[in-house]
Amino acid sequence: MRDERPPSAELDTTRPSIARVYDAFLGGKDNYAVDRAVYEQVKKVVPHQAEVGWMNRAFLVRVVRYLADVVGVDQFLDLGSGLPTVQNTHQVAQQNNPRARVVYVDNDPVCNAHGRALLEENDRTHFVEADLTEPKALLAHPGVTAPLDLTRPVALMQIGTLHHVSDEQDPAAIMREYVDALPSGSYVTLTHFWDPGDEDPELHRRAVELERTVWETGMGTGWWRGRDAIGALFGGLEPLPPGLVELHEWWPDGPATREPWPEEHLMLGGLAHKP
């Protein structure tokens, strides 16, 4: 039976880090040889996984732009935010709403060091070290409660995070706790690795193979879940149209310029509103 304990957040450059491997996917420089080795192994199974990383980032940009510009949300809590890269949450939010406040949360020491150095570029952007699987402690953290008014609407973001939380930790229960604590008018957005199962047997095979590769390379944790299990992560909230969909289908910026690669189908995302 595989070890389902989350990898240590201690800085260890001899072991791959999820955040640093993701940075490698995006062409970043904040990674080590061990992370790049995992990236190369993953590419052998899913050669276009880097495009998946960029697709996930593009989804984040579209959601944040919608919330900040169209809806008028001015508070963002970005959980498991990872390493700073291009078009970060605060840059998109503050470009569309200069008053927007953003708190990034991660428990990886590399993310924390780089986050504070590169993301806290104004008094409306903050970085907090905390564990997203502990909602009560995280929402009570002074680094969260000082810059954000949790009696007003907040956009809670779980972009590419919950597929690293095991079934034993019960990610759906964790999210219900967050949703219950959020004030009315808040939004929840998430993306998650998807196993289509009987919906598409060939993509199901790819999902199983990719999950096995993640574990065998020592990258850390990663679970490809079914549509119903991912939908339950909204904590009882109904996603806004177009619902829980493949990322390229969520209000794209324009007509598609190419057909999605098979691995780009293996991720779902959505946005929900708390009445």
Image (cartoon, grey):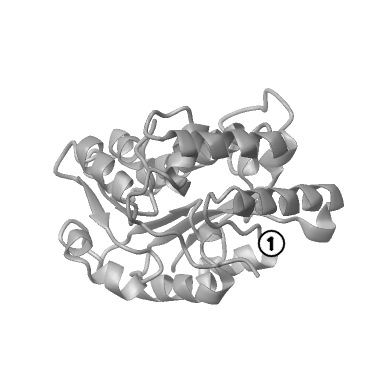
Residue plotted at (41% across, 35% down): 31
Rendered-image quadrant of the C terminus: bottom left
Please say if 228 is above or below 36: below
Measured as percent of width and height from the top left, residue 145 is found at: 19, 64
Give left or right: position of 213 versus 78.
right
For the residue pair 179 and 212, the one nearer the viewer reads as 212
Q: Residue at x 46, y 70 (%)?
A: 175
- Comparing 151 with 107, the one in front is 107
Residue in the image at 36% along x and 71% along y = 134
Where, by quadrant of the figure, is residue 44 drawn? Answer: top right
Residue 129 versus residue 64: which sits nearer the camera? 129
Query: Hey, which quadrant is residue 229 in on the image?
Result: bottom right
Residue 271 image point, x, y percent = 51, 55
> Quick one: SS at disc 1?
helix
Q: Amino acid at mark 1?
A: Arg
**Would you say 201 lies left or right of 218 here?**
right
* Above or below 176: residue 18: above
Is 7 situated left or right of 212 in this image?
Answer: left
Q: Is residue 192 left or right of residue 149?
A: right
Label 1, on which residue?
A: 227
Q: Considering the image in quadrants, where does the N terminus appear?
A: bottom right
Label tally: 1
Residue 222 horizontal/vertical position (percent): 58, 56
Q: Is residue 62 visible?
A: no
Q: Is residue 170 above or below residue 208?
A: below
- Farthest residue, direction front: 14
